[in-house]
Image: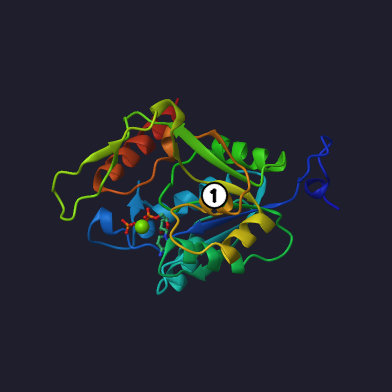
Amino acid sequence: MSDDSRPSPSAAPSAGRTAAVIPAAGRGVRLGPGAPKALRALGGTPMLIHAVRAMAASRAVSLVVVVAPPDGAAEVKSLLDAHALPERTDFLVVPGGQSRQESVKLGLDALPPGHDIVLVHDAARPLVPVDTVDAVIEAVREGAPAVVPALPLADTVKQVEPAGAPGEPEPVVATPERARLRAVQTPQGFDRTTLVRAHETVTGDVTDDAGMVEQLGLTVVAVPGHEEAFKVTRPLDLVLAEAVLARRRLNDGF
Ligand code: CTP
Ligand code: MG
């Protein structure tokens, strides 16, 4: 038995091994025409590789499952073969589905036994720092069935009655109290059994995995997120991501 598989002295409810599922099968329509979003370059390296490395940077993560664009699994596999990961980290590539939810489910289906904590991390959040990843894993180890990294909002949020046509004025119906709102990021962390059950039982549209666990009636907790875990969604986000990488290179140089 290796040191890594020994229960921690704190006798945490779960000290098991962690796998990360990375949904990367989206087109990136909002980013504009070009290659699938996860395959676009950031600082000369595909966004997906940054995201995989961000998960593999955590010592707890021993397996990364990448959910590739349906017609791009072979390409993703050779990309991963070409970019070194830490020796402790294995990877698997599976083809994705039509929706993010379906892609995550396909990734979960491919998980071998032996990992009792699962992270789900968007390929579109390539720059999440390892401290955020570790904080999520730690909260699951301490017994939370689902954990999300989250940040307070800078903007006030309004609930509206969506307009029929784009650009039409929309009536505002409510203003939720900003101090109680959080913007949620990834990686989201789960007790594996809970996440699998959520994906087997919850149907209907959801935009994150923790939302499915909420629908099971279980408690989801938020831990502090990080501004560098932002999602690359629109062209301006690429400019910001390049600037973050340039700042890191500068800091690493000193
Ligand atoms: N995703 C996926 N399978 C899909 C749709 C999305 O694996 N069928 C992944 C994306 O690759 C991304 C993450 O889910 O890493 C978050 O989705 P989003 O930021 O919306 O990415 P896209 O769907 O690619 O972008 P867009 O909505 O602009 O097309
Ligand atoms: Mg999308």
- Circle 1: is it few (<14), some (14-19), or many (20+) Cα within 10 Å? many
Instruction: Measuring from the top left, give residue 161's x and y in whole percent.
Output: 26, 46
| Mark 1, secondary structure of its residue | helix
The structure residue drawn at horizontal position 46% and vertical position 71%, both measured from the top left corner, is: 73
Give above or below for 119 relative to 223.
Answer: below
Note whether 62 is above or below 128 in the view shown. below
Q: Residue at x 70, y 57 (%)?
A: 115
Specify the quadrant of the image occupied by residue 216.
bottom right
Q: Quadrant of the C terminus?
A: top left
Comparing 50 with 156, the one in front is 156
Residue 47, x across and y down, in percent: 40, 52
x and y percentages locating residue 11 in the rendered image: 83, 39
Image quadrant of ligand 1? bottom left
Closer to the camera, 252 or 185? 185
For residue 196, side relative to residue 157 (left or right): right
Q: Is residue 90 visible?
A: no
Q: Which residue is mark 1?
A: 210
Residue behind label 1 places its C-beta within 8 angstroms of ligand 1: no
- The residue at the point 23 percent across, 57 percent down is 32
Q: Residue furthest left?
A: 168
Q: Nearer the viewer, residue 248 or 104?
A: 104
Callout 1 amino acid: Ala
